[in-house]
Amino acid sequence: MSDVSADGRPPLRVGVVGLGYIGTTVGGQLHRHVDASIDALCDVDERRLETVGADFAVDPDGRYTDYTAMLDDPALELDAVLIGTPHTLHHEQVVAALERDLHVYCDKPLATDLADAHDLVDRANRSRKTLMVGYQRHLQTAFQWARDRFADHAPTWVTASMTQGWIDDARGTWRLEPELSGGGFLYDTGSHVLDGLLWTTGLEPESVAASMDFHDEDRRIDRRAHLDVRFENGTTGTVSLHGDAPSVREHVHLWDEEGAVYLEGVQWGPRSVFEIDADAGEFTPYVDFRREQPRADAFIESVREGTDPPATARDALRVTALTEAAYEAARTGDRIPVES
């Protein structure tokens, strides 16, 4: 890695906390980026530390099993931290990074507790540093096109669904441990669906009713979730999440008086978009998928330019508020107000 980035400034010096999928995927983007360098790694798995350390060319003295030791090492002089740890650890680790005046990229969900989500919004507002959340639909051109389509009016009815063999994928991992995951499929892949729906439409949830099927006897890990959402402007919508399906499919349908916008996805590739008019005609708008920005690029741009990141703490708060209300609704059988 060069000592000078493409714009003549030193590269962004990044430490990675958590070397699972996000830590190695977004971390890999940063490792290969001309304007960044991975200077330190942290994970509780020493074997993974060794493997990823070799892949990212991080010396053994830059590998840690305690994230606070990494953050407090004066020899590193870090600029930013990538957090890819289990969900319930995010709040504590983001706070620690912001208190040390570091930029932060944190995987979703930003928090699994509404008070913690509010706390991070307040801290982000007071900080001069970037806090970006890993909701990548903000970077997908299909969702960006749909957001522009509804920029001056909200849809009147929305529906979204996601299927995935999530239970099988999560076996043997922290995702099936609620003390670390915060919940089940809704708090994991489902978080992306809720965020995509809320960010694209600008709708503010007012209340939610929900039913869930649970994987565990304690009824904490949902494998299926069905949400009936009412929004402040009178729009209604449904969200159906199936975490025991054979394949990954995503559908987001947004209706107004003129027709609809359909966002569709298979597996984890780019999402497609098409319009339906009042006569049921279908039209495919031009969307330049080549404009899609990698997450590392968006993070570095926000840090360099001092601009808001594509997905903010406020965006994440809205998702946490709806998620927490949905779990309460499923537990109680009541329609629950969404307090964000």
Image (tube, grey):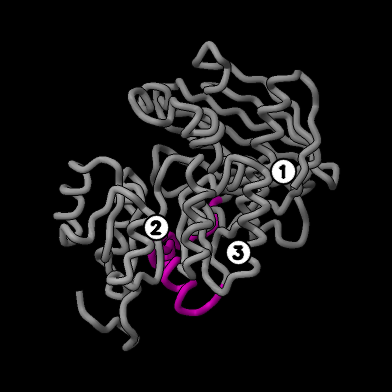
Going from N to C along the chain, the mark reached first, 1 or 3, is 3
Residue 262: x %, y % from top left: 59, 43
Residue 41: x %, y % from top left: 28, 56
Q: List the residue tagged with mark 1.
A: 255
- Separation of residues labelled 2 and 1 (CA atoms): 37 Å
Image-based side of 300 in relation to 242, left or right: left
Q: Is residue 166 above or below residue 79?
A: above
Mark 3 neighbour class, 10 Å CA radius: few under 14, some 14 to 19, many 20 or more: many
Q: Please identify, in this view, whether the residue under mark 2 or under mark 1 is nearer the observer.
A: 2
Instruction: Read off the magenta span.
Output: 284-307
Q: Amino acid at mark 3?
A: Ala
Q: Nearer the viewer, residue 28 or 16?
A: 16
Q: List the residue tagged with mark 3.
A: 124
Residue under the image location 69 percent in, 20 percent down: 331
The local secondary structure at tag 1 comes to: strand
Label 2 with label 3: CB-CB less than 8 Å: no
Residue under the image location 71 percent in, 61 percent down: 151
Q: List the residue tagged with mark 2.
A: 82
Q: Amino acid at mark 1?
A: Trp
Residue 227: x %, y % from top left: 68, 29
